[in-house]
């Protein structure tokens, strides 16, 4: 019988550091010391590019990011003894916001590689350690509580509109929707909790999306396309009925091309959609932003086709609306500038 | 007021646009002035204007600036606007305005009608328009931060001059236009320059202060704000407490505020106060789907005025909403209407959705099979990739239909048809884990356990062991094959991979396996463990999960006590059986199986 449990060669459990909501008591020199240690240890790992002297320069340095990305994409980069994973883990645990931002920037790549390699049954303790660190951080800062949204009821007045309140009952029938369910602490990645742990990492990523560089967002969009799998995009269309229907092919074989396709439960899809919404619709000006927007739109299209294949109505609604919104935003009819003055040929005082 | 509203007399000769300047009842063609400006002779242009139209310096510069702006010479316009001192103008205006009125109090109604403060509108209008155009020029030159500053100063000045907000009667059209434009422009300038916090305050200021905006502007600003809140990724601090009223709804985070604004916009449209903007309902769809509140979305869709959507569109969207919310029968009813032969019977997505929904109910399964067949037929050309989906749905429906057979022959026929369809589907979608699972279940139901176990292992591999039902299915198939020890190994592996709260069904399975292997003591241990878990789940409200997670079946405490009672009775521990039955009885008074066990207890032979 097939052994499908991943290698639980577990890294030391992530220490529960103080939540980000508490003000960091560390003074300037402490922060600098931590940044310097991180930079120094990075220079021993990344040998193909020079590490800039300060964190802020590092955050914007494309060469170093590219070097780190290529290191991450090596075949066994997720192993437990991988230096880069160790560095990412330690850096995130340092609890310094700029350092954490640096690690978050690589979340799409890490999550993408991790999830795609799960069927290959490789031990990925390194990646798991980093993801667990992110998960633990969020668990602590939220104290495990769920994130909820109270859906408005227009019969109650609000700051933006007037209304005669509901006739007699004073009780506000609260309609609470759960955006992100409660978090139980996890010391290792159990396969049934894998999607949730990665989902939380993506939620953290979304929380800082406005500070993320373009490359990172492009990585994310590519990962999404891979995860959605091939679902009848026109270029790849082959009449698959021609494949001989032997049991072995149907049962054992899996298309090489479609190797990135993963199960997509709502715990993953929801944060993915929020990030894609941002990438698709924010910033349609400027060349760089448009590239991200294009990539996000392609990812959205893949997810839409995938949701049709799975007949998942919620995902169909959400991805469909994102695609239509992008179309509307690109339509020149909708790009009238309402703040322009009328250009009469008679100017008067 | 010195405005001259006479019709324009300009003639358009090919490229040349002749413009005219009017003021103080005098008119002047712009050709000369434009020539002077082109040469860079600002002083001369200004003086010729002052003489020609008897204007003062400020008015002349404002007019010239506007001329340059319209001609597209933004740098030139900026140079002209530099000369206008906004602060001085504001001070002059404030000095000449009467002191602000005391707020009207119901108790001391004034005996004569209120007189609005008469602010010299003309001067204000000119200066503010000039500064506004300065902001626009800066925007077009890409200097958004400076543009934002200028625009903000316009609004600050307006607030200073009209301290109680602008009401209808007070302001002339031109000034109102400038103010409305400025209010709408400011937040987008901050957004473009990347200053998100300022953008948020600008939006809030635009919406909560009294600017006398017309409906369309207000709607546009509300929509832009909602889109910003939804997609910017920047969490806005909740609106200030000062603006809250007792019993009113106050949003605490971006999503709440965005949904509120979008719902208000739809309501405005429905009552005719705003123009229909199709993006509003799309944004709301996105937001509510994210929150898994598609039933609220359905209500909103139902309230949209007729004529906006075609009826089939509306039915299909509503069906999607209701099916996402789990209201299957409502969804199926709607789809029946939209798939009627006189409506849109060939809509592929609707057919597939209908088939899927019908496959969950034995009574609807035959109908679902019909939809699935039509779906398979219609999956041509570009949609051919959905053929596999259609076949899968057909297989599921036929399999479900086989549960309400009238005869053995019928049942076996349906089952073999179902297998054929699923096999056909897998040729199209050989890496769809759900399909693999469903094939396995079909084989299991037909007692082809070898195939079933093969597919169940394949499912676990394909999903990396992340789906609980896969583990359970494999264990069940193995136990059906009487391979109890292997089934137990699988269950243990599954327990390793699940978090505590989800382990209930697995533990129950394990206990039963232990019983089957004649291992009663360990079975009792397992039951005890399960009991502790179930009781703990009952006491805490359990984790707050999204709806999909709550549907995972939990183990009933009653079942546990009953299982224990049965176990003890097989061990002949009659006292323990009594205790368990009592506990079970407390939870559920009338149960056939419990009474049966009780009977056996009384009569051990």
Image (cartoon, coloured by chain):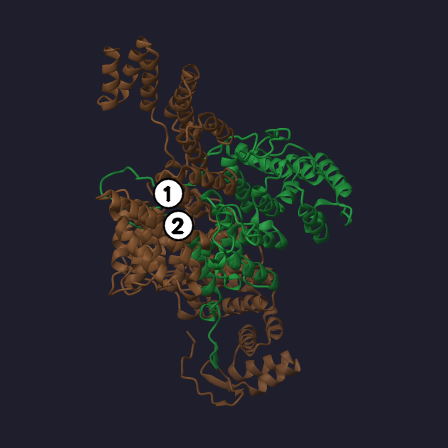
Specify whether residue B591 is in view.
no
Chain B: colour as depicted: brown
Q: Which sits in the foreground, B204 or A211?
A: A211
Query: Is residue B175 shown above or below B420?
Result: below
- Asked where in the image residue B522 lies, by quadrant, the reply is top left
Question: Cα distance, mark 1 to mark 2?
Answer: 9 Å
In the picture, one chain is green; tell me its letter.
Answer: A
- Left or right relative to A265: residue B145: right
Mark 1 crowd level (few <14, some 14–19, many ≥20, 10 Å Cα): many
Query: Is residue A331 shown above or below A194?
Result: below
- Asked where in the image residue A99 lies, by quadrant, the reply is top right
Give residue A349's position: percent from left, percent from top: 48, 76
Give residue A192's position: percent from left, percent from top: 49, 36
Q: Determine whether label 1 and label 2 are within 8 Å by CB.
A: yes
Q: Which sits in the foreground, A65 or B358?
A: B358
Tell me which residue sits at (39%, 60%) in the image. Answer: B219
Q: Secondary structure at mark 1?
A: helix
Q: Earlier in the sequence, mark 1 or mark 2?
A: 2
Query: Is residue A77 shown above or below A315?
Result: above
Specify whether residue B31 is in view.
yes
Q: Quadrant of the N terminus of chain B?
A: bottom left
Give residue B512's position: percent from left, percent from top: 39, 23
Q: Which residue is mark 1?
A: B442
Give the letter of the chain under mark 1. B
- Left or right relative to A255: residue B208: left
Q: Which sits in the foreground, B460 or B444?
A: B444
Q: Which sits in the foreground, A127 or A168?
A: A127
Q: Which residue is mark 2?
A: B422
Q: Secondary structure at mark 2?
A: helix
Q: Quadrant of the C terminus of chain B?
A: top left
- Left or right relative to B176: residue B364: left
Mark 2 crowd level (few <14, some 14–19, many ≥20, 10 Å Cα): many
């Amino acid at each position: 019988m097939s052994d499908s449990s991943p290698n639980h060669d577990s890294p030391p459990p992530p220490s529960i550091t103080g939540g980000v909501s508490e003000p960091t008591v560390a003074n300037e020199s402490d922060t600098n010391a931590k940044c310097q240690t991180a930079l120094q240890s990075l220079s021993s790992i990344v040998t193909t590019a020079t590490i800039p002297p300060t964190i802020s320069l590092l955050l914007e340095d494309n060469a170093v990011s590219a070097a780190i990305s290529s290191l991450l994409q090596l075949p066994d980069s997720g192993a437990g003894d991988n230096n880069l994973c160790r560095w990412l883990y330690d850096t995130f645990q340092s609890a310094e916001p700029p350092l954490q931002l640096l690690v978050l920037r690589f979340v799409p790549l890490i999550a993408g590689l991790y999830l795609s390699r799960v069927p290959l049954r490789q031990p990925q303790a390194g990646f798991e350690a980093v993801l667990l660190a992110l998960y633990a951080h969020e668990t602590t800062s939220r104290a495990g509580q769920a994130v909820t949204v109270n859906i408005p009821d227009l019969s109650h007045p609000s700051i933006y509109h007037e209304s005669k309140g509901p006739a007699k009952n004073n009780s506000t029938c609260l309609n609470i929707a759960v955006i992100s369910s409660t978090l139980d602490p996890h010391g290792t990645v159990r396969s049934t909790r894998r999607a949730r742990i990665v989902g939380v990492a993506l939620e953290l990523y979304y929380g800082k999306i406005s500070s993320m560089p373009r490359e990172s967002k492009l990585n994310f969009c590519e990962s999404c396309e891979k995860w959605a799998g091939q679902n009848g995009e026109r270029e790849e269309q082959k009449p698959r009925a021609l494949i001989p229907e032997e049991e072995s092919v149907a049962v054992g074989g899996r298309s090489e091309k479609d190797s990135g396709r993963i199960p997509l439960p709502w715990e993953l899809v929801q944060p993915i959609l929020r990030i894609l919404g941002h990438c698709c619709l924010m910033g349609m000006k400027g060349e760089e932003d448009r590239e991200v927007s294009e990539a996000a739109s392609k990812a959205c299209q893949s997810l839409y086709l995938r949701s049709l294949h799975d007949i998942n109505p919620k995902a169909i609604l959400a991805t469909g609306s994102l695609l239509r919104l992008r179309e509307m935003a690109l339509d020149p009819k909708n790009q009238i500038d309402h703040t322009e003055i009328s250009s009469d040929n008679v100017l008067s005082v | 007021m010195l405005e001259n509203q006479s019709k324009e007399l300009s003639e358009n000769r090919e490229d040349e646009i002749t413009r005219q300047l009017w003021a103080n009842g005098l008119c002047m063609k712009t050709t000369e002035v434009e020539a002077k400006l082109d040469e860079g002779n600002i002083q001369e242009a200004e003086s010729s204007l002052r003489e020609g139209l008897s204007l003062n310096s400020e008015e002349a510069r404002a007019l010239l600036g506007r001329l340059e702006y319209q001609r597209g010479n933004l740098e030139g316009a900026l140079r002209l606007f530099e000369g206008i001192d906004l602060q001085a103008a504001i001070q002059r205006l404030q000095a000449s305005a009467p002191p602000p009125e005391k707020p009207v109090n119901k108790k001391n109604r004034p005996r004569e009608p209120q007189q609005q403060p008469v602010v010299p509108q003309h001067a204000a209008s000119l200066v503010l328009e000039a500064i506004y155009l300065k902001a626009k020029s800066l925007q077009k030159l890409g200097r958004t931060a400076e543009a934002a500053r200028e625009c903000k100063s316009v609004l600050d000045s307006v607030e200073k001059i009209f301290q109680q907000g602008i009401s209808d009667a007070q302001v002339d059209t031109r000034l109102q236009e400038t103010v409305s434009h400025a209010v709408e422009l400011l937040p987008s300038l901050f957004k473009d320059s990347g200053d998100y916090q300022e953008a948020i305050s600008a939006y809030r200021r635009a919406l909560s202060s009294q600017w006398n905006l017309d409906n369309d502007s207000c709607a546009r600003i509300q929509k832009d704000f909602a889109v910003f809140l939804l997609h910017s990724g920047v969490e806005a601090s909740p609106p200030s407490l000062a603006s809250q009223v007792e019993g009113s709804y106050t949003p605490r985070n971006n999503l709440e505020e965005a949904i509120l604004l979008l719902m208000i916009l739809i309501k405005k449209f429905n009552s005719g106060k705003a123009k229909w903007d199709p993006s509003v309902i799309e944004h709301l769809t996105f937001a509510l789907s994210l929150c898994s509140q598609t039933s609220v979305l359905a209500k909103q869709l139902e309230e949209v005025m007729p004529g906006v959507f075609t009826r089939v569109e509306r039915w299909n969207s509503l069906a999607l909403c209701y099916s996402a919310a789990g209201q299957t029968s409502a969804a199926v009813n709607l789809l029946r209407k939209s798939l009627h032969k006189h409506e849109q019977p060939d809509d592929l997505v609707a057919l597939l959705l209908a088939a899927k929904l019908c496959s969950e109910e034995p009574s609807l399964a035959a109908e679902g099979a019909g939809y699935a067949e039509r779906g398979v037929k219609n999956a041509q050309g570009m949609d051919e990739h959905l053929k596999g989906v259609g076949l899968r749905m057909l297989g599921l429906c036929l399999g479900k239909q086989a549960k309400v057979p009238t005869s053995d022959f019928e049942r076996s026929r349906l089952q073999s048809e179902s297998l054929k369809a699923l096999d056909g589907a897998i040729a199209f979608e050989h890496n769809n884990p759900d399909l693999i699972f469903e094939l396995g279940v079909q084989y299991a139901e037909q007692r082809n356990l070898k195939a079933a176990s093969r597919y169940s292992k394949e499912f676990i591999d394909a999903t990396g062991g992340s789906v609980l039902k896969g583990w359970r299915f494999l264990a069940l198939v193995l136990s059906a094959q009487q391979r109890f020890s292997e089934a137990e190994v699988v269950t243990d592996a599954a327990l390793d991979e699940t978090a505590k709260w989800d382990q209930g069904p697995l533990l129950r399975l394990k206990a039963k396996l232990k019983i089957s292997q004649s291992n009663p003591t360990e079975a009792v241990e397992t039951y005890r463990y399960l009991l502790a878990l179930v009781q703990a789940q009952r006491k805490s409200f359990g984790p707050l999960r999204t709806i999909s997670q709550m549907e995972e079946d939990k183990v009933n405490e009653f079942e546990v006590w009953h299982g224990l009672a049965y176990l003890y009775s097989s061990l002949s521990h009659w006292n323990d059986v009594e205790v368990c039955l009592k506990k079970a009885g407390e939870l559920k008074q009338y149960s056939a199986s419990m009474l049966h066990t009780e009977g056996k207890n009384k009569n051990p032979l």
